[in-house]
Image: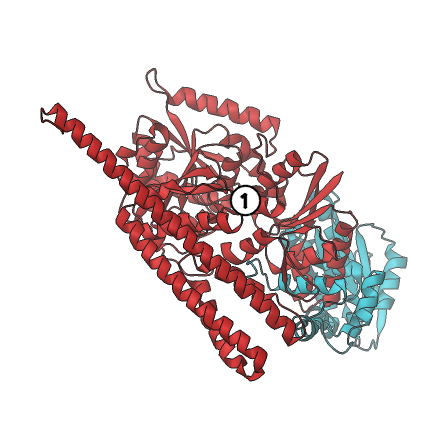
Amino acid sequence: MKIPRISSYEIKISKTGHEVPVVNNIHLHSIYDPLKEADDFIKKNHKFLQNKKEILFLGLGFGYHIDSAREFLNEFHKGNYSIVIIEPNEQVTQDYISIRKIKDKNMHLYVKENIESLYFNKKLVSFLLKRPSIISHPPSFNLYKNYFKEFLTFKSPQRIGDMKRISFEKDLKKFINELDPESDIDSHIKNKLIQKKIIRNENEYLLLALYYMSKDSMTEIKK
Amino acid sequence: MNRYLIINLRRNGDILSSARLINSIIVNDNKSNVDILAYKEFKNAAKCLRQVDKFYFIDRKKILTLKKSSLFSDGFAINYFHKFMNEVKKNNFYKIINMSNDHVSAYMTSYLSENKKKYHGIRFSKNNTIESSNQWAMLFNEVLTEYQHTPIHYIDCYHKILEIPLKRGVKLLKSKSDHEEMASKNFSIIRKNISTSDIEKKIIGIQLKSSVRKKEISKEVLIATLKRLLESKKYFPVILIAPIEKERQYIKEINAHFDDSLVTVEADFLAVISVIKNLDLLLTPDTVVKHIADLINIPILEISLGNAPFLKQGIYNTKGIVLTDSLKKRIFKSNRKTSSQSNITDRDIIECIDYMFTEMKANLNLSTDVALYKTTQDALGVRYDLITGSYDPALEITRLMSRYYISVIMDVSNTFPREILRFSADSINKWVYDQKDHVNNATRNLLNTLRSLLSIKENLYKIQKFVWDLDKLLAYCNSSSIVAIPTLLFSAGIESISDTTNIKNIKNIERLIYKLKEHYQTAIICIKHLEKNCFDNHIKISREKLVESRKRGKRDGQLQI
């Protein structure tokens, strides 16, 4: 999914003296008081910030809403939090970094990334498994609607060939490489392993264990 | 050091129950360390096991999210699982014990034990067929899971699978000293407040909730039981709940019937161990709390309801009794629907509590279709004997004879269960007649199957008849008679045949059929044992009656010649 064509970009100064990026004539923060706007926005989302210490923001802008969130999270979760931001616009991000100069070890930014490669990023996947609260920055979300929608509704390719992007251990990598790259794991297990009379590789036991685990099977084998 | 790994992918109660096996391993092998591999969601229960050296907790929730969510490639699930199992595999385990008996644990066992013969239980072979480490493992997987009224407790079976004797331990579970102190202090206060100068009231702990609704004591019976306990001068109830909102809400509803006067103890796994130690009796359905009380030898009145597998996993210690609906009406398999209505009343429960403290059976007058069992011990381990109540003599005799039969075919020295002789001679004789009929019919089918098998050797096209005869023979797996036991073992043998040539397969089947024939003959021998014992007992009773009547006659002044 391509990011929308950027026809115009400028940085304006708000009434309160804060930088506000304007992309395709859309102000990513309030031109009057971006800090108050950010505080109000985060106050509305307090419930989500209280429930989880892992927060996923869709849209960076110039990060005023992120700052407000960080302040709240620092106090509520006593510094024990993790923020990930997905932002498709590289230019805005570079300006954010150079102008705002924010450094926070609890924050991680993914910029202009291909959606598929995001979901093959081990660190991001680990973060997403913690089921973070997801907060969309409204102006950014509206501006890059298709990009974020694709992110939220992504369906990972399940071809075995696509798994090569994952860094497996040596013996597992060799095993995966020997499988039919056009097949998916479930088909391979159902058509080749379950029917199979010979287990040639010990990793096949693991695939079979995984298959039955995913069927939520706790019942005894005879049943 | 010999490092043992127990794979237990079952739930809280099953994980705690493994404490007995762990203790036996350590006592029998003083150079042993025992590790446990379990699902992370049952970590709290597993961590209560005192004698475990290392824990490996697999995050099943994470794996299932990675595998099932369309967001993520299946490769992540495979990668995580592979990394986890490799970490486990790095330990050079002396023995791997599969205590779960499901597909996942069996494949894990295969992965961890490779070609080595160092596993116990079941695993999958290189031919992807089920492989049992010994006959007991096969019995566990084939018979205990299928036979309607399990003849052996699964803890005893696991000891046999491992070929070690059960060693009773004193401290099987961990507890924290501050919990012990607080529980002791609080219960001392309760005892002081409830007792009078003449009577020391017994504290009855009541486990409120079970993980499965059908296993719970109904609210109406619970409330009625509590009323009776509070009215009695002998007992004082204390409710036990877990620190979860659902249970807090439930006790609130119950307490509303008692003006909020009930004493409730809210405790997590670790704390509840200290609480239970202070009870005189625990009244509980089949729950993890039951297993805890069982392991620390607290007297238990188990109310066995729903699919609760009482015969397979009921209380183990000898200070317990089990109150149940009549076994004839119960279905023990968790995937089958059960009747939701239990006949057990509050009156039954109170009478059983009285019995626990007085052991006066004469006072027991249970409701219709309700029965009470006690735990006893024989050479095979724990056995459940009927104390009183509604029963089907044929079912009870089958239970006890199945146990005896298994000890014979598995070569365990076990005396004949004279407990059977309490049933009437008529019941026994009817049972003998029916069972002989079953065995004879099964034997006829066996011989037909053997004949059609042998005819395949001459003419492969006769295979259809063989399949048909085999099918008829395997139907005995579902029989309620003892003939099901050897037939189930035979069926397992057939399923594990994996030779590639017809000749080898035919030879294997023939061998299995002869083994089955031997087992059917053993069944007849066992039935005849019962027949003889019944006859001898009948003679003995008749003689005793005659002697008694002669004595009475002399006392009455009649001359006896």
Which residue sits furthest bottom? B461
Instruction: Answer whether residue B470 is visible to the viewer in this image.
Output: no
User: Residue B107: x and y, percent?
Assistant: 67, 59
Depth check, front residue: B480 or B263: B480
Specify the chain shown as cyan: A
Residue B364 against residue B310 in the figure, above or below: above
User: Residue B86: x and y, percent?
Assistant: 77, 54
User: Residue A70: x and y, percent?
Assistant: 75, 50
Residue B542 against residue B397 in the figure, above or below: above
Residue A219 against residue A77 in the figure, above or below: below
User: Residue B347: x and y, percent?
Assistant: 29, 39
Specify the chain shown as red: B
What is the quadrant of residue B348 in the picture?
Answer: top left
Instruction: Answer whether residue A173 is visible to the viewer in this image.
Output: yes
Which residue sits furthest right? A98
Residue at x-position 17% and y-position 32%: B549
Provide the chain ID for the residue under circle 1.
B
Left or right: where does residue B348 sit relative to residue B13?
left
Depth check, front residue: B416 or A125: B416
Left or right: where does residue B17 sit relative to residue B484?
right
Q: Secondary structure at mark 1?
A: helix
In the picture, which quadrant includes the C terminus of chain B? top left
